[in-house]
Every structure is written in C-alpha cells, then in structure tokens.
Amino acid sequence: MASSSNSDSGSFQLLSSLRFDPSLPETVAGLGIQAYPAPNDSPYYLLAYHRDRLAKAAIHFGWQRTVDVLQKDIADLATLFNASIPDKTQPWRLRIEIDVDGVWAISVQPIAPCSLLRLFLPHALGSGGVDGLDSPPWRLYVDSQAIVPSAFTTHKTSVRDDYTAARARAGILSLQDPAEVLVVNPDGEIMEGSISTPYFRSRPSDAELWTASPDKQDARAPTEWVTPPLSSGGNAGTTRRYALVYGICVEQVVRADQLIDGEECWLSNGVRGFIRAAVVLRKKESVESNNTFESSS
C-alpha cells in the first residue's frame, strides 16, 4: 500500500496545470456559452478556478504569505503568466507552482491545437465525442496498489510520487500516451485519475451492485454522470468543479470492483478539457487484508 510522504511545510510547492489558448475568448463569445465561469475573456482556461484551488491549498497548509499573493486581482495573475508565454498566437501548457513564501515558478510547453469544444459543457459529456477527435477513446486502467489519502492527494502539490508510481505500474510512459490510471484508496474506492478527474455512469446502491452481465448492464444503464467525492481521497480539480457547478455530474462513491471492462467514461483536466475513455480491466482485482490489490485466480 502506497502513501504520500509527510513532507515538511515549505519543502514542497502547490501546483496547477492549465491551458493558454488565444482562441478561447473568441470561442466562448462565438458560441454564446453561458455555462462558463468568469473571466470569460481570458485565454487561460478556468483561470479563476486554478487560483481558487491554489488558495484553498495554501489555507490548508497555513501558508499565509501565499494566501496573500493569491488574493490579488485575477487580472494581475494573468499578467504574471503572460510574461512566460513565448508566442501568444499559439496554445501552451503552463505548469504553475507557488511556494510557502508566495514565490512563483512557471514552466511552459507547447501543446497541439484542438477543437476547443472539448473544453466546454455540456458538449463534452454527450455521445460520440467532439468532432471525432476522441476516437478511439483513451485506455483507462485501475492501479494495482492502494494509495492512502492525505493532504497531498486532496490538494495538488509537487509531492507526486504516488501518482508517478501508479502510472509506471500501468505501463504509461509519457503524458502523450492516450492512457490514464485510476488510483484507489484502501477501501477499494476510486479516488481520481493520476492526471485527471474521472466521470462514470451513476452506480447502483450497494444492495444492487452491477455484474459483468451485458444484459443486466444494458437493462439498468443509468443516464446520470457521477464523479468520486472528495471523501474518497482525490483531488479537488478545476474541471471537476466546473462539471459539478454546472450540473453535469454529481458526487457518488465508485468502487473499483464495480467497474466493467470496456465501460464508457470520461476524463478531464485543466489542459486537455474533457476526453472520452474506456475502462480496461487487465485482471480482476480485489482489496486484500494487506490493503494491496492482487490478481484473483
């Protein structure tokens, strides 16, 4: 069973990754999208949500200097990030970090242009994906070890060893791989993806657990999308908040043993938006007394 290290305050940074896309304001205005948080004229995707997430983490860890920095006007934050953008006519991925003293570290990488419809709701959680760009869907694996929830799973920080190890166990070698792995807590509940928030069709009650029977699955197929609650130990992601605020999903505990091989689901993060995925169960897994997931015979 893996667990995040108890890093001393100040020995790590708060972290968020977001998308800069010069076409974003025009797309929001052109589509007349109401279900999008302010500032809707910013080229930074869900900028206010990223600021809010960092601020909540700073409050949790008692970093008052960082809290003060993050209370500045959102326009000042955009100006700060703008200084790191090499070419404002192209889309970029920003990795933003801030430390206990409120000092920023910003790294920028180019990303391929994509249909910006995948960034918005309710387009994303319809059937068939966006412009066929998500076909085939991403492969979605389940981690073979449990992770103990902590402040470093609830809040996104530079303490990422558990997530890196989960990706390695799943054989995911690069951020460019169209694959993701779900991390699981010791109770067998899905926490989140290693770099994304997952969304599933709503699950039955414990008294009506799904079976692998295709007939039963089809007969009871729900229509509502759900995402794991924070009580399962996962991260309060920006796109997760977006989907919850605008009523696209609700919170519900999702157990690893309820997942079905080939099951359709969605993933989201602050760089790529919403992505179609399909569960890949390479082996049956169950939580043993030692809180690890082992192959059943």
Image (cartoon, rainbow, N blue to C red):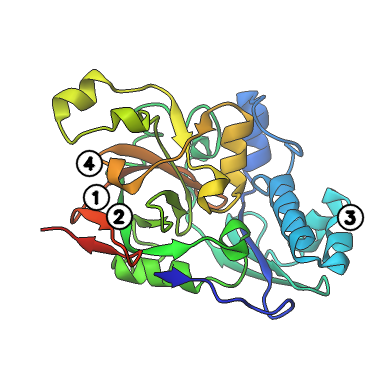
Specify the amino acid type for callout 3: Lys
Q: Residue 214's spot in the image, x, y percent?
A: 15, 29
Contact (Cβ within 8 Å) of mark 4 with mark 1? yes
Q: Compared to 105, does 35 lie above or below?
A: above
| Secondary structure under the numbered disc 2 in the rendered image | strand
Q: What's the CA distance linking mark 4 and mark 2?
A: 10 Å
Can residue 203 be seen here? The reply is yes
> Callout 2 environment at 10 Å: few (<14), some (14 to 19), or many (20+)?
many
| Secondary structure under the numbered disc 1 in the rendered image | loop
Contact (Cβ within 8 Å) of mark 1 with mark 3? no
> Callout 3 environment at 10 Å: few (<14), some (14 to 19), or many (20+)?
few
Specify the amino acid type for callout 2: Tyr
Residue that label 4 marks: 262
Q: Earlier in the sequence, mark 3 or mark 4?
A: 3
Residue that label 2 marks: 141
Q: Residue 83's spot in the image, x, y percent?
A: 77, 66
Q: Earlier in the sequence, mark 4 or mark 1?
A: 4
Q: Residue 227's spot in the image, x, y percent?
A: 48, 39
* Furthest residue toward left: 297
Quarter location, residue 285: bottom left
Residue that label 1 marks: 280
Specify the amino acid type for callout 4: Gly
Q: Compared to 198, does 157 lie above or below?
A: below
Residue that label 3 marks: 72
Q: Is residue 78 left or right of residue 33?
A: right
